[in-house]
Amino acid sequence: QVQLVESGGGLVQAGGSLRLSCAASGSIFSINGMAWYRQAPGRQRELVAIITKSGITNYADSVRGRFTISRDNAKNTVYTVYLQMNSLKPEDTAVYYCKAMRSLATDSWGQGTQVTVSS
């Protein structure tokens, strides 16, 4: 089992920045990669950014150049992934979810954190 706890969401004005964190614990050895998704009201959940075990990153076109995914796995029992969000727009408003992609096991999801960008 992998447990994910997200934090860092909140209310920010357009043009501002937020940094989301996702702390993974449990069977972190099984994690192949981590990703951030988001879901706005009435819309499907969409992939925002992904980072593989080897550190390769990729982004949705809508956030590329504004968002940065990174990780800190220096601690033995906790694996943390961040999403630095700059130049935020009202259309970035959504619930942001962290996902752990695992080897030979079901992927794990966090509980979500609300990001609201006011115009």
Image (cartoon, helix red, strand yellow):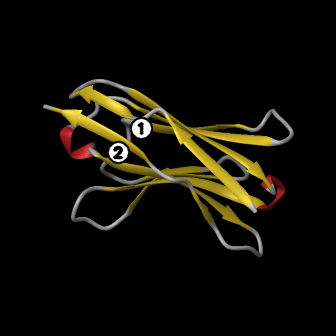
Task: Report x, y in % for residue 84.
Answer: 47, 32
The part of the image, by quadrant, that contains residue 89 is top left
The part of the image, by quadrant, that contains residue 38 is bottom left
The foreground one among 118 and 61 is: 118
Q: Circle 1 sits on which residue?
A: 67
Task: Report x, y in % for residue 110.
Answer: 55, 54
> Above or below — where is 115 with respect to 62?
above
Residue found at x 86% / y 39%: 76
Disc 2 residue type?
Answer: Val
Q: How many marks?
A: 2
Q: Quadrant of the C terminus?
A: top left
Residue found at x 47% / y 53%: 97
> Above or below — where is 3 with respect to 69?
below
Describe the element under mark 2 as helix, strand or loop: loop
* Labels 1 and 2 touching (C-beta < 8 A): yes
> Above or below — where is 96 with respect to 45?
above
Left or right of residue 13, residue 112 in this image:
right
Disc 1 residue type?
Answer: Phe
Q: Quadrant of the N terminus?
A: bottom right
Describe the element under mark 1 as helix, strand or loop: strand
> Above or below — where is 49 with respect to 21?
below
Q: Circle 2 sits on which residue?
A: 63
